Image (cartoon, helix red, strand yellow):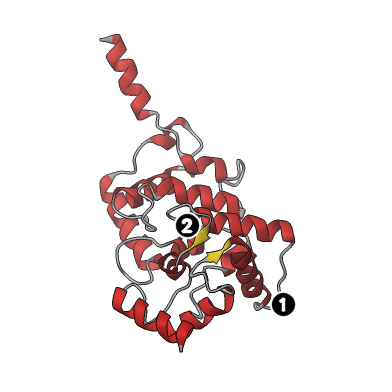
Amino acid sequence: MATNVSKHKCVRKKENFLQQFRDEQSRELKQLTATQFMEIWSHYDVDGNGYIEGNELDNLLQELASSVNISDLSSELVPENVFRELKECFLDAYDDNADGRIEIGELAEILPTEENFLLLFRKDNPLESSVDFMRVWKQFDKDCSGYIEADELKLFIKTLISARKGNNASEEKLIEYTDSILQIFDTNRDGKLQFTEMTKLLPVKENFLLRPVFKVIITFKFYFL
């Protein structure tokens, strides 16, 4: 009996992943580096499908709320009625496309992330169409390989950051951002971004790119016409 009780307590004492990112005095979340942001995203996007949803979202919200408390009670669940209201308010505030899940750009708006890295996920100037997306794709896929490789991705990130108020990033930061983006979006871990992986990074208002027929038509138009 004693052994069973002990095991039960161990289950209840689940470590809160977000506590390590809070300031010990103010209990506010610290500004996150690109690497730390990537760690948080990977931790909660358990299935790696590019969204925090379902139980993943519940886990994120429970730990986000309870991590404020530094006591041993911080691992306890938020009461169900309070949690439902919290989740509804949270999604109203941050779920921009109202699909009931959190995309990486939406999480970037929630967590205090360093400004230059945050610029990569800004949605205030999304591309107007999939044709606009293909122009960006062709510009940085310089060798027409059908992939955005690490050096091309680094150039893309540098260009995007420099376009915002003349911002600049050091070579060290550009490498960190590139590695972080690849770890988040490079789902098959081949060290480069495929067409569909890049569509998750760049928001497009009229995103027909995920439909196979449009991918074939638009790719043919820009590479061969």
* Mark 1 lies on residue: 166
Residue 3 in picture, x, y percent from top left: 31, 11
Residue 63 in view here: yes
The crowding category of the residue bearing disc 2, from other C-alpha atoms within 10 Å (few below 14, some 14 to 19, many at least 20), is some
Secondary structure at numbered mark 1: loop
Is 117 placed left or right of 186 in the picture? right
Report which quarter residue 114 is drawn in.
Answer: bottom right
Residue 13 in picture, x, y percent from top left: 40, 28
Is 77 placed left or right of 38 in the picture? left
View extreme (top): residue: 2
View extreme (front): residue: 224
Q: What residue type is labelled 2?
A: Asp
Is 65 placed left or right of 11 in the picture? right
* Mark 2 lies on residue: 186
Q: In this view, does 221 lie above or below 152?
A: below
Q: Is residue 76 above or below residue 224?
A: above
